[in-house]
Image: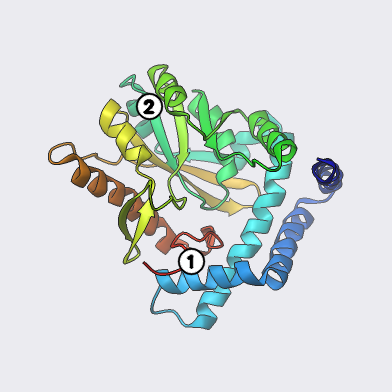
Amino acid sequence: MLIDLLLILTIKVFQLSLRILPENYQQGTGAFFGRVAFKILKKRRNVAISNILRAFKHYTEREASEIALRSFEKLGINFVEALLLPYIPTKDYEKRFSIEHRDYMDRALALNKGVIALVFHYANWEIMGIASSFFQNPVVVLARPLKRHRLIDRFMNHMRASTGLTVIPNVNTSRDVMRFLRENKIIAILGDQREKRSKGVYVDFFGESVPTNKGITMIAMKTGTPVMPVYFIRKGFLRYVIRCNEPIEMERKGKIEELIRQNTRKINAFLESIIIENPDEWFWVHRRWGRDKP
């Protein structure tokens, strides 16, 4: 607990220091942290490079390393942006952020079944809090708790809540999710996390069969709730386009096991499409494929 308190104090001091810096220095600080992390976190660097080579089999190791470095730099920028987000005045939102295809969200909410906002570790996913003000509808986000660092977990969730999110721990949340959907709220769920082999469904991801969370698909099939991919396009430091996409059409005719597999594959296919568009925006340090090839 003492270590957590010291870390939180350090972060708060760092926040205050960042706020007095010009914007280009804030961005440079984030990129510098990313480069340092790339240099010293050898295991995570190797995971990122290995993942990139699995997804883009035609890349050379040098090309994969360059993408990994840019990805680390952007992760550093994401960290700095996340610390500064709570201090951005609401009146500045419109000049920093914009939304594309808002009509998709409006039509989905008009069904009065809630919306599952399918989000990914792509660009800066913490911008979802800002998105809630554009949607003018409560956004609930499921976050995996840091079990061994409860104080840090509470601190991070407090920052997220300050931008407009309702944060609930992603542990036995099915009842809460159903209730929020009945209230026609937007539930933001990350769709690119690795699932336990015993709980996931194996579907293709960049040519390999990987265990994938089937919860999103099962909720959508049961409730008829639209599953709408929402991702963020980086346009500069703390400047993003929030892009809504047409809801993923869920197949409902056939054997349940095969339907779950087909619909979950659609989620992975969408993720593949945006990673191909901007490879350095994804969270390559995550062991999405596991430690060994299946």
Vertical side of 154 occupied by 56: above or below: below
**Residue at 39% in and 38% down:** 101
Q: Is 139 left or right of 22, judged from the image as shown?
A: left
Among the 4 quarters of the image, the one containing residue 275? bottom left
Question: x and y percent of residue 52 in the render?
Answer: 47, 70
Rendered-image quadrant of the C terminus: bottom left
Among the 4 quarters of the image, the one containing residue 130? top right
Q: Is residue 229 visible?
A: yes
> Is the residue marked by circle 2 packed among few (<14), some (14-19), or many (20+) residues within 10 Å?
few
> Residue 62 shows which numbered tag?
none
Question: x and y percent of residue 55 in the render?
Answer: 41, 69
Question: x and y percent of residue 135 in the render?
Answer: 48, 28
**Residue of label 1:** 291
Of 197 and 278, the residue lying toward us: 197
Q: How many marks?
A: 2
Q: Earlier in the sequence, mark 2 or mark 1?
A: 2
Of 150 and 235, the residue lying toward us: 150
Question: x and y percent of residue 3 in the render?
Answer: 83, 46
The span from disc 2 to disc 1 (Cα, nearest Å) is 41 Å
**Residue at 31% in and 39% down:** 217
**Amino acid identity at mark 1:** Arg
What's the colour scheme?
A: rainbow
**Residue of label 2:** 106
Label 2 with label 1: CB-CB less than 8 Å: no
Q: Nearer the viewer, mark 2 or mark 1?
A: 1
Among the 4 quarters of the image, the one containing residue 56? bottom left
Vertical side of 110 occupied by 131: above or below: below
Rendered-image quadrant of the N terminus: top right
**Amino acid identity at mark 2:** Asp
Q: Secondary structure at mark 2?
A: helix
